[in-house]
Image (tube, rainbow, N blue to C red):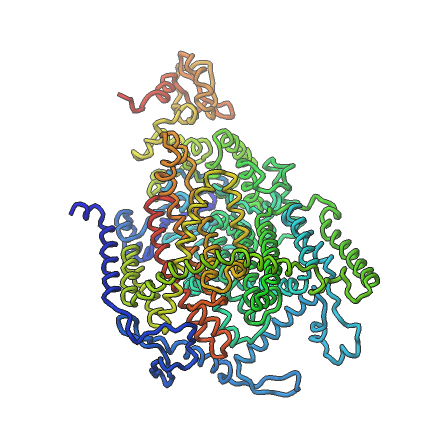
Amino acid sequence: MELFKKYPKLFQWIFLLIVFFALCFAIDVPETYKFIRGQAEFVKDPNQSTFVFLGKEVRYYAFDVFWRLPPLLGWLPIWINDSLFFLMNDWMPMEFWNEDTQEYKTRPLVLQITRNLTAFMTFLIELIREILLGGLETIVAFTSWDWIDANPWAELPGLPWTIVAAGSAILAYKLGGRGLAIFAGLAMTYISIFGQWKPSMQTLSFILVAAPLSFIFGLSLGIAAFKSKRVEKALYPILLVMQTMPQYAVLVPALVLFGVGDHAAVIITMIVAVPPMILLTLLGLRAVPPEVIEAGRMSGCNNWQLMFKVLIPTARRDILIGVNQVIMVCFSMAVISAFIGAKGLGFNLLLALNQLNIGLALEAGLCISLIAILLDKMSLAWANKQVDYFGNLNFFQRNKNSLFFGIIMIVGIALAYFGSIYFKDGYNYLFEVPHNKGISTADFWNKGVDWIFDTFFVYIKAFNTWLIVEVLQPMRALYLRMPAIATIVLVVGAGYLIGGTRSALVVCGLTLFIALSPWWDRALVTTYMATFGVIVSCIIGFTVGTLCFQNKHSTKFMLNVCDIFQTFPSFVYLIPVMMLFGITDTSVLIAVIVYATIPATRYTIEGLRSVPSGLHDAATMSGVTKFQRLFKIEFPLAFPHMMLGLNQTIVFALFMVIIGAFIGTEDLGQYILKALSDKKGAGIGLTLGICVAFIGLIFDNLIRTWVDKRKKHLGID
Amino acid sequence: MSEPVIKCESVYKIFGENAETMLKEANGNVDAKTFQENGCIVGVNNASFEVSKGEMLVVMGLSGSGKSTLLRCISRLTDATGGKIFIEGQDLLNLNNKELIDLRRNKMGMVFQSFALLPHKTVVENIAFPLQIKGINTEDSINKAMDMVKLVGLDGRENYFPRELSGGQQQRVGIARSLAVEPDIWFLDEPFSALDPLIRKEMQDEFLRLQEKLQKTIMFITHDFDEALKLADRIAIMKDGIIEQLDTPANIVLNPATEYVRKFTEEVPREKVLLIEDVMDSTTTEDIGDLKVSKDEIIENVAEKILTQEKTVAVIDNNNDIVGSINPTKIINTVFGGRKTNN
């Protein structure tokens, strides 16, 4: 009894777990239920039952009220679909002037808007693309094809790769100094020589359109949210869901609204990239010291002047960190958008992976990684760069970079001209190295992969089988035995114990949404894969982080490694694992583990680092050993921060699991992938995406509430 | 006497959701405790005072006493909950946004505790900022700002960024910026509190030199009683939002109105604060010595001379006319008497 009084929380938790397991054992999986591999919802299946909602037939698999709730939300995807189609095809038909046929035409309003939007995006993308690579479309947009035929000279020539490479080196020098400049120059030269120039520039042009637009929208919405509490409250849930929504799932509705191609991808990229920009703008503006605002007011600023002359310049660094985030999100979307037909490196990667040509995939992946690191380092250097004073420099000193770029332009054009005379075989290597004419290492890598397979096949196979049979399948079976009721009890109980009624209600709502959707079993599989990944990642990340923290140099090294790995788009991680483990669940899980270990390690190190040095000294002076210090001082204080790392680990793991569908899993991600190729898939894709986002949000809510409480308890910030 | 530059009539500032209705119900009798129980915090409680032209009013109080809130009410960085504030006869609380901005652009300057400089602008750009906001073109504003740079003694550093300056130098920039528009009213919110003691003293002297030259109407906020004594024409001592006493430094030291004020004055070295004028007898006796002291001298400076006299000493004014007398025992009583003893 005394124990009970001493640790009331502990006993509440034990009680909760007992109830949970009792429910799990009491409720059996119904006999009628079958988990059918790869079975999509769009195909009629005799095992499915149906119900009718608002005149629509909703199909679902058999349920047992206790094991799995009736799919009351089954109508949601169908409803979303129908509404989208209605919006696009029937709502508000209006007369619009058609340039091509020179007459008025009746078109639904939304269709017209989206078509105009896509036309505008296409124009922007083509413009940038043709500045980099050359082409006709931009001139055509202002004139006509007939005019082009009449004037064959009218063609944007495109920039020779030498100029682009040198230009990026100069920009890198201006932003981050000599080291970054050398890296930029080498990376661009590598890309050119290895024949990846065209797809790389396509990807780059995609980012050059998507990132500035996302920046503008994000900044304006961030300012609006800063100014009005109401706007902030309205935006908040969207921001929250978008943070945990797999990027992949957003692609699906884009198909319906904007079609296939770069323009659709740009628009959808903006939807993903704007939320982090809003958050960081808000954060930056909030961090402006109140006295600076007062100083602005006392100087007689009106609202406009206060915002643009005082607040935004003072919040410069945070806003530029936002730009960095925007660029990185745009880049990873540029790769994933290959699924809806965006051109560029991502498309080549997808193609190579589809053909199981690991060599080609590796080459594309390497280019993607190089550009990712380059973009990340450059935008961070921009954010961290202090404003400088130029007034006392003369004209040449002030404009040396532009002048230098001018010289580069002339030299580059001269070289390209020289090349057009020198290279007789039709390829001007000083202008652009064609895709199939660069140095290719694909064969080498392919041979390498074959060799690995020949040599280690037995071991890999054995490991694979062991993992699947001994670990994964039992684990999956256990997860599939979790009845919806029991899970809700567990989650709500945990919510109540951690954060009280409010928290309990929130997580209850989130869980109910998943439970009432027709995909409870798939959600369990997603959770099982994510959990497996998270557990292993946390063990690795925690150990590596703690070990690296013992030494200053290794700490710095490890943080840098995390930085670099984090910039890679998640898709890239699939290449090496497919190389080693082929197309199995193991591959996906290993990719998940690698990807999710990054935040786990980073947050462990950062958490340990955040322990105040005063405490460190105090502990040392009380004569603790290294281990005592670690266990009595550092871990307890760093633990809340590490838990935030767990939160990130879960989100990363979920993202990877969903993308893993590409290799072939049987969870929610697989359905999203299927929805991508289905013209009625928008509703399903979106609902599935929300389900995944909600899984993430359940953990997010529980962990954050706990961390906040714990931090308050410990009195750290 | 002309109209006061700043005039406050029972100003209240109460934070909280239904502050205004509660203030109305309280009917001028605001009790901080009852307000707190209802979720309101009283920042300024019934402040009434006037500041006349060229006068320096120092508002002294410990943290949380409402002194900064009072200043922000008068600069209308926050709106007062009740009462009236007049700036040169204009009703401050009735100004619309445009009029308020005009007032700030032309009449007011403010210096902040944490300097509040714009990190992306150089020294001279920071100083020119209020001018440019007003719409003055770049060249004129920079020229004017350069004058200010010289005034505060930062010439040679005009192209530095705030991050490259020491605290004292940064506050000089803050002072120069607040003076750039040549305001009539100068608000200083604990301008020297974030500085080291030595720099603080240096800045106080510099500040007095500037004020000698400029003769602005000043509201100066501080939590340092010594600073208040050194600078003020009059001091307002605040506690829990209430002005406990508002008087000249000498009167506060000699006649503290409340127990709270007395605690501050206890440790004050009176000989350094009081002038001969403050302690002299305005009557002259027959038995007067040869020594004459000016009424504007600080006691400390002439104490030795007076104490070595046996007779009463004559006090003269600027015109060398005798206006009073002072007996050596009076000096001894002032400096050593009337204090709380330790036993």
Residue located at (41% from left, 23% from top): B271
Q: Is residue A200 left or right of A483 when viewed as pictured?
A: right
Single out the residue that lies furthest toward the left. A1
* Percent coordinates x, y for residue B125 in the rendering: 61, 46
- Whether residue A228 appears in this view of the structure is no
Q: Is residue A564 above or below residue A37?
A: above
* Percent coordinates x, y for residue B126 in the rendering: 59, 46
Q: Is residue A584 left or right of A436 when viewed as pictured?
A: left
The quadrant where residue A330 appears: bottom right
Q: Is residue B52 above or below residue A326?
A: above
Q: Is residue A198 above or below residue A103?
A: above
**Of residues A250 and B8, the one drawn nearer to the viewer in this rendering:** A250
Q: Is residue A199 left or right of A473 when viewed as pictured?
A: right
Q: Is residue A698 left or right of A277 when viewed as pictured?
A: left
**Of residues B76 and B123, the one drawn nearer to the viewer in this rendering:** B123
* Percent coordinates x, y for residue A413 in the rendering: 79, 59
Single out the residue that lies furthest toward the right. A421
Residue located at (69% from left, 46% from top): A391
* Percent coordinates x, y for residue A716 in the rendering: 38, 44
Residue located at (61% from left, 75% from top): A119
- Whether residue A254 appears in this view of the structure is yes
**How many numbered tags mark residues here?**
0
The quadrant where residue B23 appears: bottom left
